[in-house]
Amino acid sequence: MYDAVDDPYTYDGSTVLKNLLDLRTADELDAFEAEISMQRATEPLPDGDLDFVHYCAVHHHLFQDVYEWAGQPRTVRIAKGGSPFCFPENIVSQAEKLFGELKVDNFYQGLSQKDFAERSAHFLAELNAIHAFREGNGRSQLTFFDMLATHAGYHLNMDRLDAGRMLHAMIASFDGDEMPLRDLIVDLVA
């Protein structure tokens, strides 16, 4: 659950996000969102240049059946557990800077497995801190990361992904410790 002040994304008097099916309970919305985004993830993903526009297209693809604003950077300040994510007025500039660095680094092609894990852990940590969307950041990050890994010549074994470990690693990276995320990535590409 995110903390947000005066959230235009939610129904009045509720924490449930406005959605295309007009589902009014968190459980119903969570179930539909998980089902449809998993289904969309099995379809061909949008082509692009592995930039912020491409990342937004991935989010739109995954969540187009759920939210009117799918693929659009959020316009409200949000936090989780009292820790604020990037302010909305800075999302585009920070994302363009991060994706620009990714391009300069040749999308991590030609790196050793250890270097790939280290660089991509930093990328994911920064992408998570930006938290470009009101909802669906984790799934979009993971989907985009899988595309990035493939482009860099690595195959991610998603059967090895433990959701609890991933959450712990992302929280640790938000607090400045990218090692658990790096180690998780090493295990996924091993």
Image (cartoon, rainbow, N blue to C red):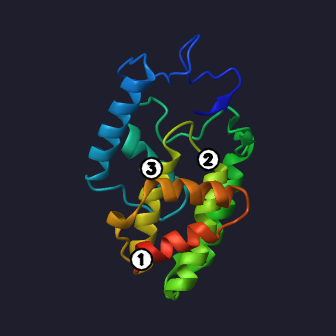
Whole-Å distance between the Cαs marked 1 and 3? 18 Å
Query: According to the image, label 1 marks what residue?
Result: 189
Q: Residues within 10 Å of mark 3 (few under 14, many from 20)?
A: some
Three-letter residue code for mark 1 = Val
Label 3, secondary structure: give it.
helix
Who comes first in sequence, dot 2 or dot 3? 2
- Against 3, residue 145 (above or below) is below
Pick the residue in front: 59 or 27. 27
Query: According to the image, label 2 marks what residue?
Result: 131
Whole-Å distance between the Cαs marked 1 and 2? 24 Å
Which residue is rendered at x = 49% and y = 77% of the image? 186
Tell me if label 1 and label 3 are in contact, CB under 8 Å.
no
Indicate which label's residue lies in the foreground, 1 or 2. 1
Which residue is rendered at x = 60% and y = 71% of the image? 102
Horizontally, residue 159 falls left or right of residue 187, namely left
Whole-Å distance between the Cαs marked 2 and 3? 11 Å
On the image, the x and y values in percent for residue 144 come to 45, 59
Which residue is rendered at x = 48% and y = 42% of the image? 136
Can you see residue 8?
yes
Q: Residues within 10 Å of mark 2 (few under 14, many from 20)?
A: many
Three-letter residue code for mark 3 = Arg
Three-letter residue code for mark 2 = His
On the image, the x and y values in percent for residue 83 come to 73, 43
Can you see residue 57?
no
Indicate which label's residue lies in the foreground, 1 or 3. 1
- Against 147, residue 88 (above or below) is above
Query: According to the image, label 3 marks what residue?
Result: 139
